[in-house]
């Protein structure tokens, strides 16, 4: 029996499935090292054209320093924009302190009328044990994030130094030309992915800003800024971008009309951009199925958490691109890619089946 070109024999499918499960479990088990390594490779692919451009104009060591400064500037700007948005929200809350106290009082009265049990409202009577537990978890997550960022920067420093030599090593391998071509193509697709992601984030931020202006929600620029920054984090960022403006709308309006309108509008923007526009743009620009884009975000999010959701699509891009370079794994690239458009012969055959000729 002849198998299709590049297809696997049926008896090898269980081995492939078992090997895939072992690889995923290994990546999850080695998360403290494998995740920052993957993030560093992603950043190196984004920063490598900058280093090449600087090397044509500056000494190599100075180009290396300049590339690192560019990466650190980008990461610092990302954190600063998010922190500045949070600070502006805090300042806005201070202006509505009286309204916030009134809203809290209304909530307490509603709870008493409906028999809803609430914790003690006097500050001196509040049990701080749950607060301490939340603070401990927050500090642990912050410590983990700092460690992840630090190890990622270490891998980035070493990777930029070794990138040129690593390319020379690839060329010496038996299939070095294919590996080098796959690495170059993966780098180009990583950069294309960030361009698409940035475009979607900008559009989401502008739509959020315009919607806030239309409904009369204050700090419209702040909500647009927060939506722009958080949209780089798939799904989780969309949820985080909705909650603060809804809470602020309740404080600003003092009733439920503005919060409900704000929630519906913000959710519509995030759902439309995150679940419809973004997957299709990424799929079209990166030759991936939109369904694969969504599944990859959830899958790598389960493996590596929020950072895995952020880097899930690039990882899938790299896997599909690398497999497409070798005949034995091209079937996987075809499964992950977009469905090919039917040619004229297939369309004519389909029309013939739907409308058979009359006898």
Image: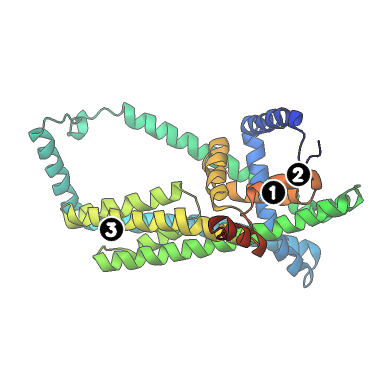
Farthest left residue in view: 113
**Is 253 placed left or right of 236 in the picture?**
left
Task: Residue at 18%, 51% (x, y): give it.
Answer: 256
Disc 3 element:
helix
215 and 290: which one is in front? 290
**Is 4 placed left or right of 39 in the picture?**
right
| Sequence-first tag of 3 and 2 | 3
Cβ atoms under marks 1 and 3 closer than 8 Å: no
Disc 1 element:
helix
**Is 285 placed left or right of 96 in the picture?**
right
Farthest front residue in view: 359
Task: Residue at 65%, 34% (x, y): give it.
Answer: 27
Q: Which residue is mark 2?
A: 329
Q: Quadrant of residue 227?
A: bottom left
Query: In which quadrant of the rendered image does the N terminus lie?
Result: top right
| Residue at mark 3 to residue at mark 2: CA–CA distance | 55 Å
Q: Which residue is mark 3?
A: 92
């Amino acid at each position: 029996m002849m198998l299709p070109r590049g297809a696997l024999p049926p008896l090898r499918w269980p081995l492939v499935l078992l090997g895939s499960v072992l690889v995923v479990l290994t990546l999850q088990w080695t998360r403290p090292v494998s995740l920052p390594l993957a993030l560093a490779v992603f950043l190196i692919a984004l920063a490598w054209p900058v280093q090449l451009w600087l090397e044509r104009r500056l000494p190599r060591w100075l180009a290396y320093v300049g590339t690192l400064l560019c990466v650190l500037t980008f990461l610092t700007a990302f954190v600063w924009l998010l922190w500045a948005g949070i600070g502006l929200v805090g300042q806005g809350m201070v202006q509505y302190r009286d309204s916030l106290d009134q809203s809290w009082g209304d909530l307490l009265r509603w709870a008493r009328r409906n028999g809803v049990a609430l914790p003690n409202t006097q500050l001196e009577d509040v049990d701080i044990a749950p607060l301490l537990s939340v603070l401990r978890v927050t500090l642990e997550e912050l410590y983990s994030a700092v460690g992840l960022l630090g190890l990622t920067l270490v891998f980035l420093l070493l990777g930029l130094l070794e990138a040129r030599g690593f390319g020379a090593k690839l060329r010496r391998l038996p299939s070095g030309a294919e590996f080098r071509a796959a690495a170059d193509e993966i780098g180009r697709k990583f950069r294309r992915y960030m361009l698409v992601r940035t475009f979607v984030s900008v559009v989401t931020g502008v739509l959020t800003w315009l919607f806030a202006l239309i409904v009369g929600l204050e700090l419209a620029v702040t909500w647009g800024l927060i939506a722009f920054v958080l949209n780089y984090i798939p799904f989780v960022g969309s949820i985080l971008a909705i909650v603060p403006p809804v809470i602020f709308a309740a404080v600003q309006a003092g009733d439920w009309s503005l919060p409900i309108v704000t929630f519906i509008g913000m959710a519509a923007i995030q759902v439309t951009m995150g679940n419809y526009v973004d997957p299709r743009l990424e799929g079209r620009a990166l030759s991936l199925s939109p369904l694969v884009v969504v599944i990859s975000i959830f899958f790598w999010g389960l493996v590596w958490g929020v950072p895995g959701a952020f880097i899930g699509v690039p990882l899938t891009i790299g896997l599909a691109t690398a497999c497409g370079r070798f005949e034995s794994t091209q079937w996987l690239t075809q499964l992950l890619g977009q469905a090919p458009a039917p040619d004229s012969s297939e369309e004519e055959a389909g029309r013939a089946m739907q409308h058979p000729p009359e006898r």
